[in-house]
Amino acid sequence: MRRFLQWLPVALLSGCALDAGEGFAVLEPSVQAAYTPLPRRDAGDGYQALASDFQLRMDSGAVSLGSIDLLASSGGGGATTFDPSSPPPGYSLCHNGHCHSDDGSLVDYEDIQAELGGGGITTTTVANLPVDGELDLLAAPTVGLTCKPDCELTRTNVSSGRWSITGLRMTGSVRDGRVPARFVGVRTFRLTATTSGTEAEPLAVLKGDLDVPSDRENKPRVELGLKLALTPELFDAVDWSTAKEGLDGVVDLDAVENAAVRTALLQKVGEVSPTAEVNRGAW
């Protein structure tokens, strides 16, 4: 009996450490967005060579993120076909590759299909990371984030992040690297793309893969560094020779006459895949 009583506290403590419950992982999230010139594209004077033989220099840039959703995947049931024209319960307004969820988030078609059982996978949002203010693309500061409802996760596996781009501001200049040139001299440009209102469509929805298990097999403290890297490749599809200058001599990409240029640029933004740096440790 005495030996049993001596071991009882140890057994109880061990049981508490192994039982399922809250706090399997605690996130310490941060975000950084940066415009990153590529050494192989250096054209001198701060310009970067584009695939179109135009050369571009970024003078200022900032991006706004409505939020970043952290998604977890788990096994699902039988397959059900997803029809955007008739979304399942919990979703509405399906268009442009995503649907509006009742919780206010935007969910990709493929995630809804997975949730319905296609492929046997269910995707759920485990944390929402609001991002306040603009992120300077040239200074590229690292900004700490909070979590809703909590940075403390139950047992799960964070498999991806969904980024909502709600604003993009850029100024810079473009010149032609061809001889003969398609236009003479240097053209300056500006872009001020924004959304307004809580129900407004984002400019782009990005998705990046993650692998952050929340369990007893991994250390609980998770430093999650989310990164968005924009490069000159964004501008490869833009035909700057068709862009129209305004009365002030600047190519305003928000002007109606430059809608095709703006659309080409935002389409490339939508193809960017964010990345993450994950460091784990004990408390």
Image (cartoon, grey):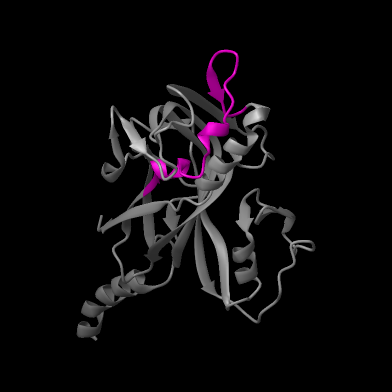
Foreground residue among 220 and 18? 220
Residue most toward the top?
248
| Image location of residue 264, percent across then percent down | 57, 43
Which part of the image, by quadrant, shows the N terminus? bottom left
- Whether residue 140 is visible here, answered yes or no, is no
Residue bounds of the magenta highlight: 226-254
The reply to whether residue 108 is visible in this rendering is: yes
- Taking the spot 43% from the left edge, 23% from the top edge, the residue there is 186
State left or right for residue 187 relative to residue 110: left
Q: Is residue 221 left or right of residue 114?
A: left
Viewer-side residue, 136 vs 70: 136
Q: Is residue 233 magenta?
A: yes
* Residue at 47% in and 46% down: 147
Classify residue 197 as left or right of residue 241: right
Residue situated furthest right in the rendering: 86
The spot of residue 97 in percent (x, y) is: 65, 56
Counting from the top left corner in percent of width and height, residue 29 is at 38, 47
Out of 139 and 142, give the one closest to the viewer: 139
Using the image, determine if residue 114 lies above or below residue 58: below
* Residue 217 covered by magenta stretch: no
Q: Give the quarter of the figure containing the C terminus.
A: bottom left
Say which quarter of the image contains residue 54.
top left
Residue 13, picture quadrant: bottom left
Location of residue 261 in the rendering, given as x and y in whole percent from the top left corner: 58, 36
Residue at 53% from the left image edge and 16% from the top image edge: 249
Relative to 163, say whether 18 is above or below.
Answer: below
Q: Residue furthest front?
A: 180
Q: How many numbered marks have been drawn onto this rendered protein structure? A: 0
In the depicted structure, whether residue 233 falls above or below residue 194: below
Residue at the spot 32% in from the left edge and 74% down from the top edge: 12
The one nearer the camera, 276 or 192, is 192
